Image: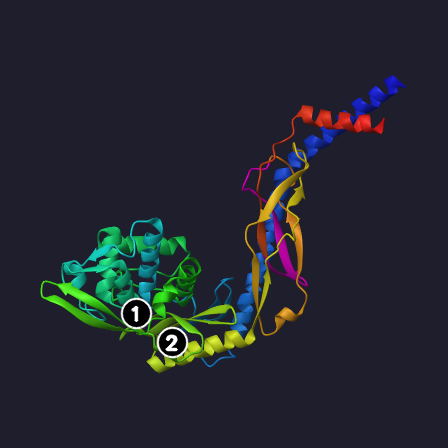
Amino acid sequence: MKKKSIICLILALCLSFQSFCVVYATEASTTTEVQKDLSEELDEAQESETEQNATNQSVLDIQSPSVVLMELNSGQILYEKEGETARKPASVTKLMTMLLAFEALDSGQLTLESNVVVSAHAASMGGSQVFLEENEQQTVHDMLKCIIVSSANDAAVAMGETIAGSEEGFVQMMNDRAKALGMKQTNFANACGLEAEGHVMSAKDIAILSRELLLHHPEVLDYTTIWMDTIIHKTNKGESEFGLANTNKFLKKYEGANGLKTGYTSAAGFSMSATATRNGTTLIAVVMGSETKDIRYADAAKLLDYGFANCSIYEDNKVLDGDNQLSIKAGTEETVTVKAENTFRHVFVGGKGDEEVEKEIVMLKEEAPVKKGEIVAKVEYKQGDKLLGSVDVIAVKEVKKAKYYHTFQKLFYQFLQLK
């Protein structure tokens, strides 16, 4: 009887080793295939959304040549017309100047009390300005007011020079940041938006930039909602008060409007990134190249009205439903501790949120080793056969690959339990 038990144990170990080798050999290809299938499904979903947006274009009477409507949290584009066409952005350019200024504050390079010294170059800027003089000093806080409220070109260039050492260096930073954000139709030639060869953005790129600014620097709204304010010019001639008036009159024309930036030159026409919040939903309406200021505001209002009237938000804050353990094979542990990388949010347009949304965990990594921070699964969200999107599930702790002695030990314990 004892001899028979030993033979059974040896056979079990052999079968386990054979299974271990087969699974190990196929693990990489299986994971790659699952990731490929998920990518293809998401591409199909995005194509479907694009087709729907194209259909929606006939719904609104938009006069401006380029517009994009985006929901803030999801980044989902709800409406688009010539959204990827490169056009002159005028002072909407300053959104990037604002973003880099807030990032300099976050990094500790600047504080709101830091002084910005105005160069002769910055003071020479024409167009919209607050008439800063060479060697004049203003705090970062006041310079931000000048840039955001009054759309001051001189303040924008002075800020860029303070951050990068020169406007040329700052422009390089602007273009590098645009590339990192995936702004494919953008090229900056200056910090303020004055006419320059090759200085272009698309409506979609402006929406991407606006979203980055609002998501990571919501304090920008403390400035964009200022209607009137003042700064104090301090020069060799003495001190004098200078009034600031917000160039964005849309703030008083649309309920819930809170930003973000307007722009105009004779060559660019009237443009803006208009943001508004209602019932916890924030929309970004980008309008470019309007013939008149009234058309710009009217088209922005139509886009926002359409979005607020037709959008329903599906949001899941408990992606894993409290289950933070997933089974893992061939590891020193039988489970891996995981967490969802973020919440899931999807915007339905035109009442499409009535149908039930289902979610499913799709394993991308079924065997150890698993590194801390590694993506091991995705939670897919579907409505019927349509994939709405997914959330990455990452490992909180590592799980090492089981050695042969771990497998033997496990089988030995199982054998003892059987006896």
Structural distance between the alpha carbons of marks 1 and 2: 12 Å
> Based on the displayed image, in which of its 4 quarters is residue 219 positioned?
bottom left
Instruction: Report the amino acid beneath label 2.
Output: Leu
On whether residue 371 falls in the magenta region, the answer is yes
Which residue is at 41% across, 81% downward?
298
Q: Quadrant of the C terminus?
A: top right
Identify residue for label 1.
Answer: 149
On whether residue 143 falls in the magenta region, the answer is no
Identify residue for label 2.
Answer: 251
- In the depicted structure, whether residue 387 falls above or below residue 228: above
Which residue is at 68% across, 25% downward?
404
Q: Main secondary structure of the magenta part?
A: strand
> Based on the displayed image, in which of its 4 quarters is residue 234 positioned?
bottom left
Q: Which residues are magenta?
A: 370-389
Q: Earlier in the sequence, mark 1 or mark 2?
A: 1
- Camera sees residue 57: no
Q: What x and y, as percent, mark residue 267?
A: 27, 73
